[in-house]
Amino acid sequence: MEIWEAILLGIIQGLTEFLPVSSSGHLELGKAILGDQSVPEESLLFTVILHFATALSTLVVFRKDVWEIIRGLLQFKWNEETRFSLKIIISMLPAALIGVLFEEQLEAFFGGDIAFVGAMLIVTAILLWLADRAKNTGKPVRYRDAFIIGISQAVAMLPGISRSGATISTSVLLGNDKGKAARFSFLMVVPLIFGKIAKDLLSGELDPLQANYTFLGAGFIAAFLAGLVACTWMIRLVKRSKLRYFSVYCLIVGILAIIVSFAA
């Protein structure tokens, strides 16, 4: 992999982590187009690093929210921050359970099967179209909603299913306010990403000592900067009900991916 390729994949990750078009799906398509021949462990490490970068960009964009949550938790009271944190924990349960029980099966989907990615992008397109047609409300995310949104996040572990698209769409279809749905969607993934990275490093599944830090660093910086822009932009788009455009985009890319896979 060349440095420019690492930067390009980093930009793809940074933009698509927040825009509802599936970052994992676009990374798989990007690696297929660029002819990435990395062994699974190296490819997975690069993907993990890029997700780490976008998690940090989320913390930067929502730094005030994160600080308020931490300050509220340190009061050790049953306040709004404590309730919000509990909802985040509830939303993490489905993805954490699936990730632990079916980790090897999930990794098998990241092998360059662009036909599968294309099919999942079409599923994402349908979800976004339905959510865009839903009316906006002022309802906050409830505990039951948090668990259902968590199930959507677990399904979005498949490449081609947009995590932000699936979770925001699910939340909106449950009747939640679009702005609050976006905020909850972006914050709920941060603990999972950090937890996954810590687990992989401690278990020895990833070997940072054998990594090419030049490529990883270039991809990290590109993903972080692109993530800052995309996260801020996406919040505005969700509030303005502009998801239909991403729905059309996912549909087109999904169909093209399937056509290319059969033509190859």
Image (spheres, rainbow, N blue to C red):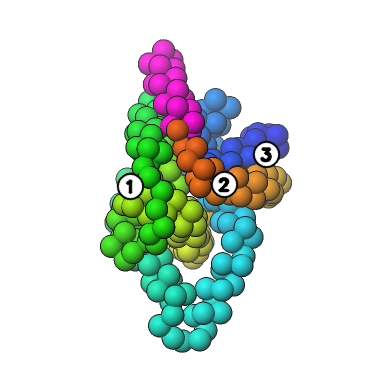
Where residue 50 sits in the image (x, y, percent)? 58, 48
The answer to whether residue 116 is visible is no
Q: CA distance from mark 2 to mark 1?
A: 18 Å
Q: Which residues are magenta?
A: 245-264
The answer to whether residue 252 is visible is yes
Q: Which residue is mark 3?
A: 7
Along the line of sight, the residue nearer the viewer: 120 or 79: 79
Local crowd at mark 2 within 10 Å, few (<14), some, or many (≥20)?
A: some
Q: CA distance from mark 1 to mark 3?
A: 36 Å
Q: Which residue is mark 1?
A: 173
Residue 175 appears left or right of 193: left
Query: Mark 1: which amino acid?
Result: Leu
Where residue 103 sits in the image (x, y, percent)? 35, 52
Is residue 65 covered in magenta?
Answer: no
Residue 222 marker? none
Query: Mark 3: which amino acid?
Result: Ile
Along the line of sight, the residue nearer the viewer: 38 or 263: 263
| Marks 2 and 1 in Cβ contact (< 8 Å) | no
